[in-house]
């Protein structure tokens, strides 16, 4: 009686050991990279992952951490002094040095929030430049925009929700100037059936992996001439918009 019982237990232990070993091998083989895990620190020297955009948006309200991350990229910038009041208060804006080439913005006087600047660097490095080389054969030398900060509600209404522009947590990208001088504009080239149109759609789609909200001409007429990109902090598992 004792021997058969011991053999049954040994078989069960052996089976459990085999299952555990298979599970460990599977985890090692399928283990997602750090950028695909919600609990790992954000690093901009890694490819864009499943949680990159959410980690960047979560930098809202974490000014010191955001500025440190921005400094780690090597980009030249200055923290901007606080501006605005109440719902239009901005305390984490930055001004990118116009003399550097990592992120050339036009006009250069724009002062987006730090999370938007971090998002622009990730987008420029991992999405915009690869798409430009692949489709247009030249890198992007300058991003053109319509601005970041605007103390207003959505669509300039007198009531309703406040725009992310009210806290400089958004920027409206209107065009891209290539190194050879060619220009790709959202208004003029969005419906182009060639490479310029393909480029604009590619950077819109890639932007959705970095920014909490990306709105393009496909969304409505109000966005016919720009890509609205913002870092609305809607929580770790909050909704994201890509149109």
Image (cartoon, rainbow, N blue to C red):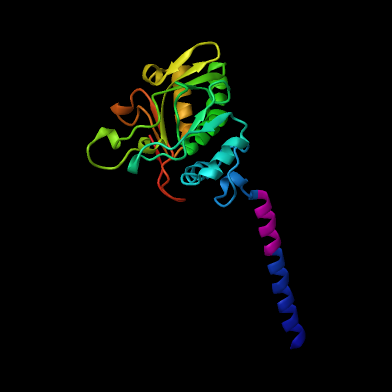
Q: Residue furthest front?
A: 81
Q: Residue furthest top?
A: 181
Q: Residue furthest left?
A: 158
| 190 lies left or right of 202 | left
State the predominant SS element of the stretch in magenta: helix
For residue 45, what is the image quadrant?
top right
Q: Residue at x 46, y 37 (%)?
A: 211
Residue 74 belongs to the span the image colors magenta: no
- In the figure, 43 relative to 99: above or below? below
Q: Residue furthest right?
A: 3
Compare residues 134 and 214 and report the one nearer the observer: 214
Residue 20 belongs to the span the image colors magenta: yes
User: Which portion, as a residue range, is magenta?
Assistant: 19-29
Q: Quadrant of the N terminus?
A: bottom right
| 226 lies left or right of 92 | left
Task: Provide residue 216's location: percent of width, then percent of height.
Answer: 37, 29
Task: Provide residue 154's location: percent of width, then percent of height.
Answer: 29, 36
Q: Residue at x 33, y 31 (%)?
A: 219
Compare residues 159 and 94 and report the one nearer the observer: 94
Task: Provide residue 164's location: percent of width, then percent of height.
Answer: 37, 38
């Amino acid at each position: 009686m004792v021997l058969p019982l011991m053999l049954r237990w040994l078989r069960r232990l052996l089976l459990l050991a085999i299952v555990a070993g298979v599970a460990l091998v599977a985890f090692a083989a399928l283990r997602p990279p750090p950028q695909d895990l919600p609990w790992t620190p954000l690093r901009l020297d890694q490819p864009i992952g499943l949680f990159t955009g959410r980690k960047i948006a979560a930098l809202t309200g974490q000014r010191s951490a955001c500025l440190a991350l921005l400094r780690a990229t090597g980009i030249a910038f200055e923290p901007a002094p606080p501006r605005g009041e109440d719902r239009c208060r901005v305390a984490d804006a930055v001004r990118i040095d116009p003399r550097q080439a990592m992120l050339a913005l036009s006009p250069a006087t724009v002062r987006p929030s730090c999370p938007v600047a971090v998002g622009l660097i990730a987008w420029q490095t991992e999405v915009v430049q690869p798409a430009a080389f692949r489709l247009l054969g030249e890198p992007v030398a300058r991003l053109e925009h319509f601005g970041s900060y605007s103390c207003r509600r959505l669509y300039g209404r007198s009531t309703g929700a406040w725009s992310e522009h009210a806290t400089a947590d958004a920027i409206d990208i209107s065009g891209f100037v290539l190194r050879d001088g060619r220009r790709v504009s959202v208004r003029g080239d969005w419906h182009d059936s060639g490479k310029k149109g393909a480029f604009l759609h590619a950077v819109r789609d890639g932007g959705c992996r970095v920014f909490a909200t990306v709105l393009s001409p496909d969304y409505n007429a109000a966005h016919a001439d720009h890509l609205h990109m913002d870092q609305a902090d809607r929580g770790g598992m909050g909704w994201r918009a890509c149109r």
